Amino acid sequence: MDWPARSAEGWRWLAANPARPADFPIGWLAEDEAGRAAFVGQFPQRFWIGDQPVLGVSGYSIIVPPELKGVAGRLIRRIMNRTDVALFYTLNANALSAPLYRRHGLSPWPEGAHALKLTWMIDPMAAAGAGVIRRLAPDLSGRPGPERLMNRRLGRTRR
């Protein structure tokens, strides 16, 4: 999967997550001379083992264009090798990324429920349209490209 557009506005949006500590990096980026980029996001969260607080990091949005094959592993190891992180996990367990996770010793948990996908309805009309597309033209729904269910209103709704 490629990352077709990066912008200062997009980085600000990602960094503005109120749950992210200000001193914790958003993630790791690798860019080649041609401007192609690979990215792995990281989101910290405190956990407790008994009375002891520990830091866990969720990896997300592993985006690597084919030209940068192999870079994802280095970016993932950047997160996994942090000395202040007690556990590393990701919520994205799709078939495309499964071999990558296995290479790093990660396994789905809980077994049998890891492939469950939860969604939240943002735009009922867009969701209905996506259902029609999946039914009439299933080859379109699996094609890489920009997210088809995003719309201009996302992010501009009342809090």
Image: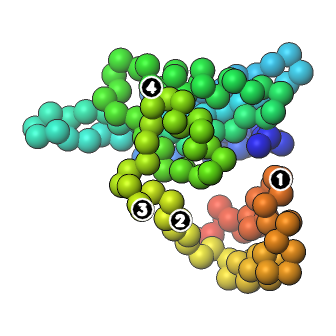
What amino acid is labelled 1 in the image?
A: Gly
Judged left or right of residue 154, residue 118 is: left
Of 115 and 56, which appears nearest the observer?
A: 115
Of labels 1 and 2, earlier in sequence is 2
What residue appears at the point 75 percent right and 27 percent down from the top-left corner?
69
Residue 82 visible, this angle? yes
Q: CA distance from mark 1 to mark 2?
A: 20 Å
Q: CA distance from mark 4 to mark 3?
A: 24 Å
* Disc 1 residue crowd, few under 14, some 14–19, many 20+, Cα 10 Å: few
Of labels 4 and 3, earlier in sequence is 4
Q: Label 1: state its secondary structure.
A: loop
Label 4 belongs to which residue? 80
| Residue 142 position in % (x across, y down) | 78, 61
What residue appears at the point 31 percent right and 29 percent down from the top-left corner?
86
Of labels 1 and 3, earlier in sequence is 3
Label 1 belongs to which residue? 145
